[in-house]
Structure formats: C-alpha cells, structure tokens
Amino acid sequence: MRFQARPWVAALLPLVLALPWASHALDAPAIRTSPGKPAQLTERPDATKEVKSVPPREVKAAPAADPLDRVRQRLAEKLGAAPAASTDPSVVHVVARSSASPAAGATRAMVPSGTGHGGVSDNGTITLRPRGGQGPVRAVPHRAPVVAWSYEGAGAPDRWGQLRPEYARCSTGKRQSPIDIRDGIAVQLDPVQFDYKPSGFGVIDTGRTVQVNVEKGNFIHVAGRRYDLVRFDFQRPSEERINGRQFDMGVHLVHKDAEGRTAVVAVLLERGAEQPVVQSVWNNLPLEKGEEFAAQTGVDLTTLLPSDRRYFTYMGSMTTPPCQEGVLWMVMKQPISVSSEQLAVFSRLYPMNARPIQAASGRLIKGPN
C-alpha cells in the first residue's frame, strides 16, 4: 500500500524545523550501528565553531655549561684528583686522594677557608680565588716541599730529627756527637798509627761545608783495625769541645774499614800561623757549589796533624743527618794553627756550620794520662 502524507503534516513540517531545539538536534552525535555490535556515538563536525590551535610543547634548552666546571676538571687533572660538586659557584672544591687513608680509594673533600690572594698558607693548604668568585678558598692540601737540613731556619739542628724518618736518630739517639769532652778517665791509650802520604785530592763546596775527597792509599790503624781515609771537611767553630773550650775551626778526617765501620779523627784549629793543607784546599775551591774541583798538585796530609798525637776517644755518631751511631771518635788533644786570613776565607762561605753539643748520656770517655 502506498503511503501518502496527509496535507496537514506537510504544512506543519517547516514550522517544526524552525524551532530552536530542532537545530540543536542536528548537532547531536550521530548514532553508528554495526551488525551484532552496540550503537556508538560519533561527534559531528561543527563548521561554525572556531578551531583553537594548541601551541606545541615548549622544549627547554639544556643549561649552558658552567665555565667553572672546566676549571674544576683541569684542576683535578693537574692534581691527580676528582672534582667534587659544589653548591656555591664561587667555590672550587677538590676531592683529593689521601695516602694516609687506610681504605683504598678513600677520599677527603676540602672545605673553603683562609684569606688573601691565593698561594700556600701557613697551615699547609693551597688557597685559590676562582675567576669571578668572592675571596680565596682552601682547595687542596698542599704537600710542602721537603725541608733540607741546615744550621739555621726551618732545617736547623734542633729539627733534624723531624725532617725525615731516616733522620729520627738525630733526636732520639743516645750516642750522638759532638760532645764536650770532660770527666773522662785517664788511661794509657794505644797510639793511632797514621799511614798518610802525599796524595791527589778534589774539593767540593757542598753548600754546608768545604769537603775534600782524597785519593786512595791513606790509612790509620787503631784497635787492631785498618781504616781507609775517605774524605775530610771543615767546621766553624769547632764542634768538639774540651772541658768547655771551643776552638776557631775543626776538621774531621773520615775513615772506613772493610766492614763499613766508621772512624773519625778530629783535629782542632786555633788562630795562629798559616796552615799549609788548609791553604792548598782554599787555593782549589770550586767556583760553583756541588762541583768537584780536581787539584793539579797533591797534598801532604801528615802536616794536617799535630805533633802531639795523644787523643781522647769515645763512641758517638756522625754530626750530620742521618746522624748514624756506632762511630769511633778520636779527638786530638793538641790543636793546630790556622791564620786569620784562612779563617776569614772560610767565614765568608760558612760563618757557622757546627752542630750544637749533644748529651754525653753517661758514655765512657777515655783520654791520655
């Protein structure tokens, strides 16, 4: 049967479409159906709506590299350490490897400290002023250079034992030299047999004394042993004293035996006539410290000894670091003379290079009767 719309329906249709709710109905989601599936709603595009563009997500740029990071890295490379992070951009911290740490790889961070314009401070740290920073900081521990032993200042004799571990005996030893020779016992000592002869020699200004190296062939015989003369050197004033008396200069003749034992003959010098061996040494002084000057003529070492060969003897040490003990000392009782001019030459080089007197510590001292 054919359907025909009634005339009144056709007349009302335009009026219905003109109503407000009808236009909204056209914007309602469309219903999409599929066989065997529930209906789904879909949005109708609204051509009249303004389409708002969504701005792209802002991508934050990576922060610029801190110039101090490169400074820290270069400082770490120089110091053999790893740079540590700091919350203060004006401070450079360095984590330094500590050799004293019992754990392998242990680290120690330095903290800011100090004032001034950088450098090594009195407490043994390096202070740095970062570029653009405020004030210096303690960046790394400073390993102070080894202090050389000397006769004054930081390396003076009272500090020898603390300068290096191998110098400890200079402070702790009980048989140290020189001593003030007094309260000895008078006995009949066997004479020292000197087998010296004219010999070639070389002179070295060591920076602490004038040392003379003697060619082989000179010996002494004492207490049944033979000792070879190795060298002799000078001190001003004399290091040894006899009953409290100190002399203008002293000379130590150092000998060694086949087993490495040391025997030293000490000769005391007082102002008087010119001494020929001393003058030969002064004539051959080198122009530079540490360089040996080989003399073109020999020297008769017997003229360096007094005519009276009596002596005092005791067990002591070397008078320079490492202050080894077990040294046999023989100090000539009679001094020899040296001229004022010869004294003046040495005084220009070394006004004072004598170790102070050490405690006798109850050791036995034997002397001539």
Image (tube, helix red, strand yellow):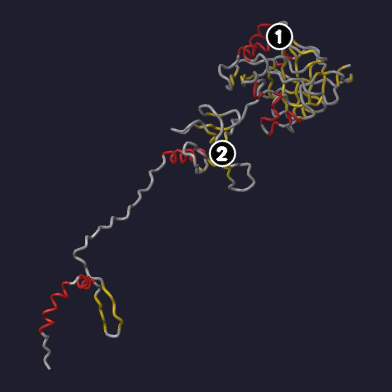
The answer to which quarter of the image holds residue 229 is top right
Measured in 3D between alpha carbons, the distance from the residue under mark 2 to the one under mark 1, in whole angstroms, is: 58 Å
| 49 over 78 or under it: above or below | below
Image position of 272 (left or right of 91): right
Residue in the foreground of this view, choosing between 354 and 34: 34
**Which residue corresponds to the image point at 69% horizontal and 33% vertical from the top-left?**
166
Residue that lies at the very extreme toward the front in this rendered image: 8
Across and down, in percent, residue 72 comes to: 47, 39
Q: Secondary structure at mark 1?
A: strand
Q: Residues within 10 Å of mark 1 (few under 14, many from 20)?
A: many
Residue 222, given in percent of the width and then of the height, sits at 80, 24
- The image quadrant where one finds the N terminus is bottom left
Where the C terminus falls, by quadrant? top right
Question: Which residue is drawn at the image coordinates 62% and 48% (left, top)?
Answer: 103
Circle 1 is placed at which residue position?
338
Please state which amino acid type lies under the numbered disc 2.
Answer: Met
Query: Which mark identifies residue 110?
Result: 2
Q: Nearer the viewer, residue 260 or 220?
A: 260
Height in image: 38 above or below 284?
below
332 in relation to 122, above or below: above
Left or right: where 303 falls relative to 119? right
Q: Position of residue 14 (x, y in %)?
A: 13, 75
Which of the numbered marks, if any, corresponds to residue 232? none
What is the x, y in percent for residue 289?
58, 20
Three-letter amino acid code of the residue under disc 1: Val
Q: Which corner quadrant of the image does residue 44 belong to?
A: bottom left
Choose mark 2 or mark 1, whichever is in front: 2
Q: Earlier in the sequence, mark 2 or mark 1?
A: 2
Is 103 placed left or right of 60 in the picture? right
